[in-house]
Image (spheres, rainbow, N blue to C red):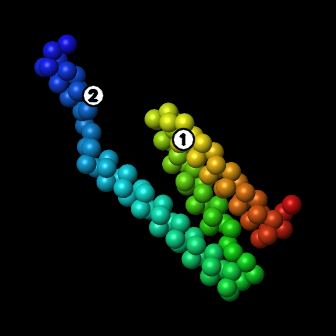
């Protein structure tokens, strides 16, 4: 393959993709998950102060979001560490869901 063929193939593969937008979305995703973690901490602390204990439902949602991001990245990129983190975060989400069901709804 010569230089022109490689450039032509690259242009065809990258058609209709905006790499700046992809970078911005990736950065926004990271920031959003970090803000979500802070909000969950705040909700848990306020709930613990004004109620009988922390709010586990917020943690269930947050860990499910983290798990979804990691498992999606694993499905697309096939990086084993993404699968590992996705499974760990899924475990956290299930743990907090069971604790939520037990404490709040009296199940189990």
Q: Position of residue 43 (x, y in %)?
A: 59, 76
- Which residue corresponds to mark 1? 81
Q: Is residue 38 left or right of residue 25?
A: right
Of the numbered discs 2 and 1, the one sitting upstream in the chain is: 2
Q: Give the residue at the far bottom of this rendering.
A: 50
Residue at image location 62% in from the left, 67% down from the top: 58
Q: Give the residue at the far right of this rendering.
A: 108
Q: Quadrant of residue 40?
A: bottom right
Query: Badge 2, how many Cα within 10 Å: few under 14, some, many 20+?
Result: few
Q: Position of residue 84 (x, y in %)?
A: 60, 42
Residue at image location 53% in from the left, 46% down from the top: 70
Q: Quadrant of residue 54?
A: bottom right
Q: Is residue 26 left or right of residue 93?
A: left
Query: Badge 1, how many Cα within 10 Å: few under 14, some, many 20+?
Result: few
User: Looking at the figure, which quarter contains the N terminus?
Assistant: top left
**Tag 2 near tag 1, CB within 8 Å:** no
Residue at image location 55% in from the left, 54% down from the top: 66
Q: Give the residue at the far left of this rendering.
A: 4
Decide: is 38 above or below 27: below
Q: Is residue 87 left or right of residue 53?
A: left
Q: Position of residue 27 (x, y in %)?
A: 36, 56
The dot on residue 101 is none
Label 2 – label 1 distance at C-alpha? 27 Å
Q: Secondary structure at mark 2?
A: helix
Decide: is 2 above or below 94: above
- Which residue corresponds to mark 2? 13
Q: Secondary structure at mark 1?
A: helix
Residue at image location 53% in from the left, 42% down from the top: 82
């Amino acid at each position: 393959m010569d230089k022109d063929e490689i450039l032509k193939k690259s242009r065809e593969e990258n058609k209709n993709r905006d790499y700046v937008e992809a970078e911005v979305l990736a950065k926004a995703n990271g920031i959003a998950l970090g803000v979500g973690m802070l909000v969950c901490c705040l909700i848990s602390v306020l709930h613990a102060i004004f109620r009988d204990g922390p709010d586990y439902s917020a943690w269930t949602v947050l860990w499910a979001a983290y798990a979804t991001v990691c498992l999606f990245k694993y499905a697309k990129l096939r990086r084993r560490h993404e699968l590992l983190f996705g499974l760990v975060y899924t475990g956290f989400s299930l743990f907090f869901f069971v604790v939520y069901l037990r404490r709040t709804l009296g199940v189990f």
